[in-house]
Structures are given as C-alpha cells and as structure tokens.
Image (cartoon, helix red, strand yellow):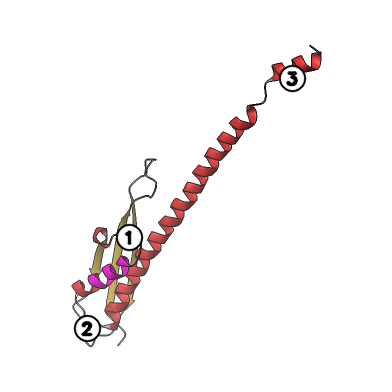
Amino acid sequence: MTLVSAKRRVSGDEGQSLVEFGIVAFLLVMLLFGVIEIGRMVLVYTAVANAARTGVRYAIVHGSDNLATTDQIKTVVKNFLGTSPVDPTRATITINYPACNNPGCKVTVTASYPYDPLISYFPWPAINLGSTSQGVITF
C-alpha cells in the first residue's frame, strides 16, 4: 500500500458533501415556508382591509338618501370576505355609524380576523389581523 492511498483512506471526506447538502436543504426549505407564510399573511391582511373599505363605501353611498343599517353593512363586509381565502364567520366587524343621515357624518368600520397559519408545525403566537376604515357622508 502506498502512502497516498493510505492517506486517502484515512481522510474519509466522502460523506461531507451529503451532510452539508442536508443542512443547507433544510434551511432553504424553512426559508421557503417562511416566505410562503408571510405572503399568505399579507394576502389575508389585504382582504380584511379591503373588506373594511368596502363596508365604509357602502355606508357613505347609501348615506343621506336611505340610511343603511349596521346589519346591511356587516353583510356587505362578510360577503366581500367570502370571496377571499378567509372564513367570514370568524371575522369581527365593528361599525360606528351615527344615527344621522346628514352630509358630514363620519362612518367607521373596523374588521379583524384571527390569522391561522398554513404551517402549524411550529408554535405561532395568536395574530389578529385588523384594519379600520373611515369615510364621510358627502351627499
């Protein structure tokens, strides 16, 4: 046996590439799952914010001529949330709609939704995504 072949046999770095690939692949997959989860969270937040905006728009358009009820506004917000990837029955909707039908009255709609992560393997804190939208009855 020569000195070169004995040294090659003792060094034993044939499995090093496999271990490095395993570590890097695990970290890459975790990063990919994190990006997917954050993207989904932004999607849900955008849906909740747009639903609140839609509720305010409905209230100010149906303002001075025929006063919209809070139940009608909640129905509009829940119908908008039904078209997005959230469960509208879990949403909390708060409406501050004064009983005046004069131009200049402010309408505030607050919508919030408890976010449930797509990947539930890791412990996530309770995240409540919410948005408040405000409008003024102008006519």
Where does residue 60 sit, x and y in percent of width and height?
29, 80
Reply yes or no: does residue 55 show up in magenta.
no
- Cα distance between the residues tagged 3 and 2: 89 Å
Judged left or right of residue 52, residue 20 is: right
Query: Mark 2, residues whose alpha carbon is within 10 Å: few (<14), some, or many (≥20)?
Result: some
Q: Nearer the viewer, residue 98 or 58?
A: 58
Q: Residue at x 33, y 73 (%)?
A: 54
Amino acid type of the residue that numbered disc 2 sits on in the rendered structure: Asn
Q: Nearer the viewer, residue 56 or 137?
A: 56
Query: Mark 3, residues whose alpha carbon is within 10 Å: few (<14), some, or many (≥20)?
Result: few
Where does residue 117 sit, x and y in percent of width and height?
37, 49
Query: Label 2, on which residue?
Result: 101
Query: Label 3, on which residue?
Result: 8
Main secondary structure along the magenta-highlighted residues: helix
Which label sits in the foreground, 3 or 1? 3
Query: Label 1, on which residue?
Result: 86
Amino acid type of the residue that numbered disc 1 sits on in the rendered structure: Val
- The answer to the question of whether label 3 and label 2 lie on touching residues, with beta carbons closer than 8 A, is no
Vertical order, 34 against 111 (above or below): above
The quarter of the displayed image where residue 95 is located? bottom left
Judged left or right of residue 29, residue 9 is: right
Q: Which residues are magenta?
A: 75-86
- Cα distance between the residues tagged 2 and 1: 33 Å
- The answer to the question of whether label 2 and label 1 lie on touching residues, with beta carbons closer than 8 A, is no
Vertical order, 30 against 86 (above or below): above
Where does residue 123 sit, x and y in percent of width and height?
37, 40
Q: Nearer the viewer, residue 104 or 121?
A: 121
The quarter of the displayed image where residue 131 is located? bottom left
